[in-house]
Amino acid sequence: MTNHTEPLPFPIWNSDHAASLDEPQLLLYRSNLLGSDLRITNYGGGNTSAKIKQTDPLTGESVEVLWVKGSGGDVGSMKLDGFSTLYLKKLQALPGLYRGPALEDEMVAYLPHCTFNLNPRAASIDTPLHAYLPFAHVDHMHPDAVIAIAAMADSEALTAQIFEGTVGWLPWRKPGFELGLMLQRYQITHPTQRGLVLAGHGLFTWGIDSKACYENTVGVISHAQDWLSRERDARKAVSFGGAARAALSSQDQDATLARVLPVLRGLASKSGHKLMHVDRQPAVMEFVNSCDLAALAAMGTSCPDHFLRTKIRPLILDESLYTLQGVDLVRALDSKLAAYRADYAAYYQRCKRADSPAMRDANPVIILLPGIGMVSIAKDKATARIAGEFYVNAINVMRDANAINTYVGLPEQEAFDIEYWLLEEAKLQRMPKAKPMVGKVALVTGGAGGIGRAIAERFLSEGGCCALLDIDAPGLESAMVELRKRFGADAIRGIVCDVTSEASVIAAFAKTVLEFGGVDVLVSNAGIASAAPLEDTSLALWNLNQSILATGYFLVGRECFRLMKAQNLGGAMVFIASKNGMVASNQAVAYCAAKAAEIQLSRSFALEGAPLGIRCNVVNPDAVIRGSKIWTGTWSQERAAANKVGEDDLEAFYRDRSMLKRSVFPEDIAEATYFLASELAAKSTGNIINVDAGNLAAFTR
């Protein structure tokens, strides 16, 4: 028997805050509150609405306007511009144009004609489900507890029993115009009910105002949760048939994932780079280690949002794969993926219709690893994470449905008709073209410094993800806070790393693999600056420069080379060296020698990497004063003394000695780095770009 702790309460409606809001703002507040709890609805799932009196901008008359979550939005994070607004009277006239269920999709084209006040937000397919219910406020949510009931074989009878007739039930019907009319007809004949369960789908609830609607929604969900908990306890239910295996130790899990994920990612990314998300929460571990894993996973999910995000079923890896390495691991994983793709293609062929869109990427989205957890894989980190969250919802549904009754997934044809729905295909086609770095990961050493941070910003702005490595933990956290605000938490990770330590470097790459699945771009940027006359250069100072700027670049580059080789996707390395690697500066022997070693090291990586599609190039900055951390120590004093100028005059000194008479900033280094790492320089390796505003002595030829 599984022990269950008392569930946490749902978010509380803040009446004081609500009192300051108008009707549209109250709808937004309710929506965000509902979407803040994944037990109520998953990301992008469900929708909310309110029928609000507003002044018609053409006639000046008061008209009723349906505010409803627009296409593609998320109730938890949306703003007011995420709602579609439509004339309710026009929506209510649409049934007169309806030609029956076989042609219901054509009704979507009429929705833009109902738009109020030229609102550009496209109306969703669920708009009729809200328009034809007579209530001022309506919520449509996908709570795990209710979907568990909706996915039981005896769903209709159990709904009547659990809610004692206060909540109704409708059989499965895909979202659309016909379902909206079904809701309307049902409510007319059951006017006193507080909600409606849609088999295999979710929950509809309503209220006279936003607060009443919210409290009704969470009330129905709480009631369902309480019933499930009591029933499980009464039956002494064992989740998923009990445990079939024990989880691997945390250390063994990490080691296995660090070895397996890069190979798996590479094989699944042949049609385009993908990123991974690892989930090992208790619900996942209970499922992947259970007796019923294979049987339940094969049945597929129930709620349409679940399999739209996760495909109809996951891939389960054999535990025998975990000990394989090298070619044996590649062959075994390739065989598993090929079998999955063949099975998916057969599903497509069985279910396709004459007008079905072409088959999409047949690789799995959800990969289950017994003893380890779940990996989700998608075109970007956020999509992979969200897909995993959806499958956790599906796990929760399967656990309760099968423990109390019999879990029922959607019939295969129904699932296909949702996955390859022409309206969904049209939505996909409307999506903007992906930015060039989407699906790729850049690992940047020295990420807390000005140049490292600017490089990260450049990659993040092009849709990539970044792992920032730095020995400066407080500086790294500061950079992380700033970058997360601008680019979101999914895209950025900070890892404390000492590049002079082999163990620290290996651990940092393993951590990056666990976070993203691999690395596509290495920017070796960790740095130190020192100056001293030759006879005053101590062995300790010499060794410090060599350990960070030469040995550190070797350790980081070697580990990345191994990872890129395992992925078999090629890759790009960029070493941030220095003008001093090309031409020595006075009184900086340790620094100059180490920077020269970096440049020669990069050529060796370019030479050995070329057959694998791994490119390695160099950016040589000079005199990057503003925003660069190397000037925060004694370096500025030392360089000022060596050049016989005051510290305050250094920037002008370096600017004026350049051929172009221009200062060099971190953003300039970032631009050159991005060029060399991107497909813009796909045919360049072993090259050097000087970003120094022109220095004749540093010319590469």
Image (cartoon, rainbow, N blue to C red):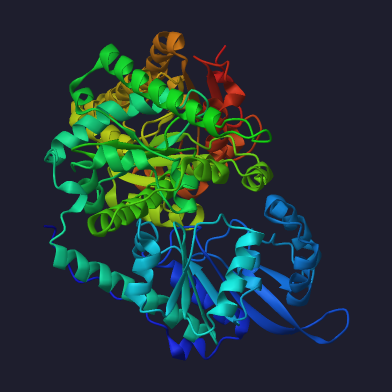
Q: For the view shown, which residue lies furthest in the right direction?
A: 59
Q: Is residue 457 above or below residue 695?
A: below
Question: Can I make out residue 468 in this image?
Answer: no
Q: Quadrant of the C terminus?
A: top right
Could you tell me which residue is drawn at 39 percent across and 19 percent down? 596
Question: In the rendered image, which quarter is residue 601 located in?
Answer: top left
Q: Position of residue 493 (x, y in %)?
A: 36, 46
Which residue is more in the foreground, 312 or 99?
99
In this rendering, would 340 be left or right of 399? right
In this rendering, would 680 be left or right of 97? left
Q: Position of residue 31 (x, y in %)?
A: 51, 72
Which residue is more in the foreground, 467 or 557?
467
In this rendering, would 457 be left or right of 408? right
Could you tell me which residue is drawn at 14 percent across and 47 percent down? 242
Q: Is residue 569 above or below residue 493?
A: above
Could you tell me which residue is drawn at 56 percent across and 32 percent down? 360
Question: In the rendered image, which quarter is residue 175 located in?
Answer: bottom right
